[in-house]
Image: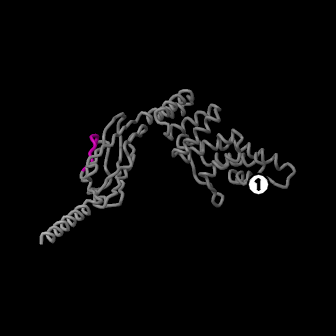
């Protein structure tokens, strides 16, 4: 009888142990894809959205009970509450920043949940409008043809935020205006990489043409200008409305011509000048085409 009781006791203890282990075998486990946020080029009066992805690698649900941020005047949580993250899933929490005054501030986002491994998670946040402001100052000087002053401002903005596309774009156009073509091309390539796709490629097209990289110039134009039934995509440079899609077609015309692709060059001339009467059979056709392209320079540039 004693042996039976001993065996029964051991069996019950083992069952209870296994049950307890099974109960806690894979609880909720929270993790974050972001440990800090830094914005050095926040524009004024513009919504800037960013997301933090939260993962739950356990089995139990995680409930986010609160998200706090001292500077409530400039941040909104756009993800609705309650925020529940199921086991084995992820969820993106979206934050919206909007600044209506210049500032440079540090704050902290604090996320509180019932996750046993990390119930309170803090994310340091740095916010600044300085690079944006310096860049805007650079564009004002650029538009006043003060290229030396503009170059200084854009360089300062880039030192504050090396991936700020608008500062890179401004530096590119300033270098282009002062015939620093290789530097301009480097700036435009960086601007395209970091988000200024259209204006960056427009500047790149000018730089590539002036560097005699004719095929690259054509590719830069084609990256954002398409021609449908003889009508090109509409385009106006955001910082200088005198530069538009017609200038891009002229770049293509000249680049095609200098690549000895005369048919493609004339196709661009036909769009720019619908009354074109060039005759490809004429013994002076190549020279006539060059003259037609040159005459269009004053019209479109």
**Residue 116 placed where, x, y %?**
25, 52
User: In this rendering, is residue 58 above or below 216?
Assistant: below
> Is 90 left or right of 200, judged from the image as shown?
left
Number of numbered markers: 1
Residue farthest to the right, as pictured: 283
Q: Residue at x 33, y 43 (%)?
A: 123
The magenta stretch is: 66-72
The scheme the figure's colours follow is one colour
User: In this rendering, is residue 52 above or below 43?
Assistant: below
Which image quadrant: the N terminus? bottom left
**Residue 131 placed where, x, y %?**
44, 34
Front position in the image: 20 or 144: 20
**Residue 247 placed where, x, y %?**
64, 45
Q: Residue at x 61, y 52 (%)?
A: 225
Give yes or no for residue 71 being in the magenta stretch.
Answer: yes
Q: Residue at x 77, y 51 (%)?
A: 262
Q: Which structural element holds mark 1? A: helix
Front position in the image: 200 or 91: 91
> Is 62 left or right of 174, judged from the image as shown?
left
Q: Residue at x 60, y 45 (%)?
A: 202
Tell me if mark 1 has few (under 14), some (14-19) or many (20+) residues whose alpha carbon lies within 10 angstroms of its own: some
Q: Which residue is mark 1?
A: 263
Give yes or no for residue 143 being in the magenta stretch.
Answer: no
Q: Quadrant of residue 226?
A: bottom right
Which image quadrant: the C terminus? top right
Front position in the image: 146 or 70: 70
User: In this rendering, is residue 26 above or below 142?
Assistant: below
């Amino acid at each position: 009888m004693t042996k039976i009781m001993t065996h029964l006791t051991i069996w019950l203890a083992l069952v209870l142990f296994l049950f307890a282990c099974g109960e806690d075998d894979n609880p909720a486990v929270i993790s974050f894809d972001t440990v800090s946020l830094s914005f050095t080029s926040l524009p004024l009066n513009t919504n800037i959205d960013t997301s933090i992805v939260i993962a739950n690698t356990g089995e139990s649900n995680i409930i986010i009970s609160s998200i706090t941020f001292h500077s409530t005047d400039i941040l909104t949580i756009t993800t609705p509450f309650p925020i529940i993250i199921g086991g084995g899933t992820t969820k993106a929490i979206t934050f919206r920043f909007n600044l209506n005054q210049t500032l440079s501030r540090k704050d902290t986002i604090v996320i509180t949940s019932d996750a046993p491994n990390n119930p309170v998670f803090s994310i340091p946040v740095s916010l600044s409008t300085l690079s944006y402001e310096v860049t805007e100052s650079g564009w004002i000087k650029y538009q006043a043809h003060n290229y030396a002053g503009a170059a200084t401002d854009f360089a300062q903005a880039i030192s504050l935020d090396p991936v700020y596309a608008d500062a890179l774009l401004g530096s590119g156009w300033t270098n282009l205006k002062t015939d620093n073509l290789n530097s301009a091309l480097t700036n435009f390539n960086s601007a395209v990489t970091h988000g200024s796709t259209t204006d960056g490629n427009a500047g790149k097209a000018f730089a590539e043409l002036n560097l005699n990289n004719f095929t690259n110039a054509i590719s830069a134009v084609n990256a954002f200008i398409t021609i449908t039934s003889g009508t090109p995509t509409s385009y106006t440079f955001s910082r200088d409305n005198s530069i538009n899609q017609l200038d891009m077609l002229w770049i293509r015309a000249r680049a095609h011509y200098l690549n000895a692709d005369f048919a493609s060059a004339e196709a661009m001339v036909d769009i720019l000048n619908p009354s074109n009467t060039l005759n490809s059979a004429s013994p002076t056709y190549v020279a006539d085409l060059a003259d037609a392209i040159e005459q269009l320079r004053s019209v479109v540039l």
